[in-house]
Image (tube, rainbow, N blue to C red):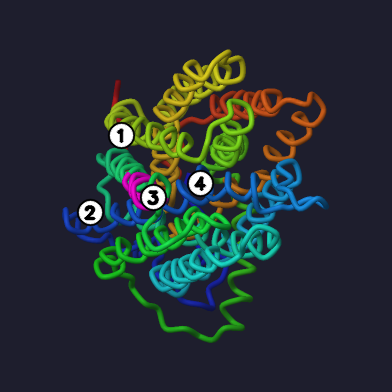
């Protein structure tokens, strides 16, 4: 079935590409691919140190003070979960709209640069709030996290252009693997320079200054290693007919895309499936360090060691499964990863000791990388040549639209059973529902509907 033509919906405005004039593919050159992948290397420091392991744990354990002036971990965990949920809501609302605007104006690189700069600036700001100033810290975190997620929309949208169809899975997987290497190295630097020394470099331990300084490390890391992407990736700029006209046309097109999504039936089914299983994965990332600290008594140093191990495992998994993706297809790769994630999560819930929890964490890392990389490559195979930013905007939406549900259920079950183990068990529900919905996706039909006949699925 022929995919919908944007020109049929909104003929009054130019686009960066049309089916008759496909989105120009960037040259498949190693320089381009490595510059693109290096952005994964750059931005993973943010998710690893801020969202998952270091700052999240510092916030929940020390930023919220009770009436007695002592840290209130329960209130800290609740406040952090609200910040994560608010981020998800804002990204879900903004990402499809901004993606469609970037499609119409050929400005995804400009959007990517702006959102990256905002994320870096807000991350620097996270250094300054001290224990007792939790709301200021949370506000900065939400700004940084929203900007980070939006930058990922435009970054991901370059993938179908730079990768030949027969290697899109491998290139996506290599990007994720390089990202985990970046997160790993950033964690090691934070450990060696700021956490382990009795007198950390430039920062005292009073008020957790040495831990807060990890935000400065993240900002510098992100800024430096994202430069190759911005100097190498290119856009085809389209003359703008005016902000008002763009906004009106973008609104019409988004509404039309929602209505006509049935013509991309398998892409739609995949996005709905991802809405569930990615919520489970986001919950694991958001509360993994908190669970390790609260249930198993991990210190900040031990959490960093744990994060290093998970990044090694996830990088290896993303790299190895990139070849599986190109051989078996994205759908099968995601399903395999969901089976592994479910088994590892179940092990983590019932882990009787730190040693068993470590094993569970390693297997979660091995499966998480392929899940994310194969999801990104699969939507790339399903994306029409003229809708990269818009489809990746919806990809971000489904990654965040229900992302409040996981943290909310985690908090409810943790409170009801007075145990974080019950909260972690809730993640299994999301993996199960997502996997069952994914079974209904026909990858071959989805590729055919995209209008990318060259993006064929390898025969088994």
Q: Which residue does the image show at 46% across and 76% down from the upper left? A: 14
What residue is pinned by disc 4?
54
Residue drawn at x 47%, y 83% as measured from the top left:
240
Q: Secondary structure at mark 1?
A: helix
Give whichever of discs 3 and 1 has the lower sequence position. 3
Q: Which mark is residue 287?
A: none
Callout in the foreground (3, 1): 3
Give the quarter of the image for residue 187: top left
Q: Which residue is mark 1?
A: 322
Residue at 39% in and 39% down? 373
- 40 or 108, which is in the foreground? 40
Looking at the image, is mark 2 or mark 1 earlier in the sequence?
A: 2
Q: Is residue 226 visible?
A: yes
Residue 185 appears at what percent x and percent y? 31, 46
Percent across and percent down for residue 346 are 58, 17
Please name the residue that numbered disc 3 is placed on. Answer: 190
Q: Sequence order check: which comes first, mark 4 or mark 1? A: 4
Label 3 or label 4, whichever comes before in sequence order? 4
172 displayed left or right of 352: left
Badge 2 marks a residue whose secondary structure is: helix
Magenta stretch, residue numbers: 185-194
90 vs 262: above or below? below
User: Does the stretch in magenta take in 156?
Assistant: no
Residue 217 % position (x, y):
39, 59
Instruction: Name the front one of labels 4 and 1.
Output: 4
Look at the numbered disc 3 and give the secondary structure of its residue.
helix
Location of mark 2 (residue) = 34
Q: Residues within 10 Å of mark 4 (few under 14, many from 20)?
A: many
């Amino acid at each position: 079935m022929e995919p919908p033509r944007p020109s049929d919906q909104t003929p009054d405005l130019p686009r960066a590409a049309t089916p008759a004039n496909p989105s120009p593919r960037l040259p498949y050159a190693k320089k381009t691919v490595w510059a693109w992948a290096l952005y994964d290397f750059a931005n993973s420091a943010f998710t690893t140190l801020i969202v998952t392991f270091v700052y999240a744990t510092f916030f929940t354990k020390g930023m919220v003070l009770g009436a007695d002036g002592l840290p209130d971990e329960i209130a800290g965990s609740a406040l952090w979960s609200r910040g994560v949920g608010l981020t998800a809501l804002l990204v879900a609302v903004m990402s499809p709209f901004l993606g469609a605007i970037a499609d119409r104006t050929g400005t995804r690189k400009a959007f990517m640069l702006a959102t990256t700069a905002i994320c870096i600036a807000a991350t620097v700001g996270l250094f300054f709030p001290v224990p007792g100033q939790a709301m200021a810290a949370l506000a900065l975190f939400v700004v940084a996290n929203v900007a980070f997620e939006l930058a990922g929309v435009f970054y991901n949208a370059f993938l179908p252009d730079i990768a030949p169809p027969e290697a899109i899975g491998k290139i996506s997987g290599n990007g994720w693997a390089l990202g985990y290497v970046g997160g790993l190295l950033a964690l090691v630097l934070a450990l060696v320079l700021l956490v382990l020394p009795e007198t950390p470099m430039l920062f005292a331990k009073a008020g957790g200054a040495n831990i807060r300084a990890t935000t400065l490390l993240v900002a510098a890391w992100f800024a430096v290693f994202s430069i190759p992407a911005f100097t190498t990736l290119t856009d085809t700029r389209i003359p703008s007919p005016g902000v008002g006209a763009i906004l009106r046309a973008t609104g019409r097109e988004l509404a039309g895309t929602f209505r006509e999504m049935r013509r991309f039936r398998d892409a739609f089914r995949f996005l709905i499936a991802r809405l569930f299983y990615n919520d489970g994965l986001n919950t694991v990332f958001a509360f993994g360090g908190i669970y390790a600290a609260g249930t198993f008594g991990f210190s900040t140093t031990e959490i960093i060691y744990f994060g290093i191990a998970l990044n090694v495992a996830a990088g290896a998994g993303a790299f190895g499964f990139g070849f599986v993706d190109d051989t078996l297809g994205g759908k099968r790769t995601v399903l395999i990863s969901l089976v592994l994630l479910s088994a590892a999560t179940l092990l983590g819930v019932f882990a009787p000791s730190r040693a068993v929890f470590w094993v569970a964490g390693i297997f979660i890392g091995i499966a998480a990388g392929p899940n994310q990389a194969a999801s990104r490559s699969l939507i790339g195979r399903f994306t029409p040549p003229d809708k990269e930013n818009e489809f990746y905007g919806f990809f971000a939406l489904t990654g965040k639209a229900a992302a409040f549900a996981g943290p909310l259920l985690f908090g409810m079950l943790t409170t009801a059973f007075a145990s974080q183990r019950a909260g972690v068990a809730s993640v299994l529900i999301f993996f199960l529902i997502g996997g069952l919905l994914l079974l209904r996706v026909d990858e071959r039909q989805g590729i055919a509907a995209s209008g990318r006949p060259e993006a064929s699925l390898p025969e088994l």
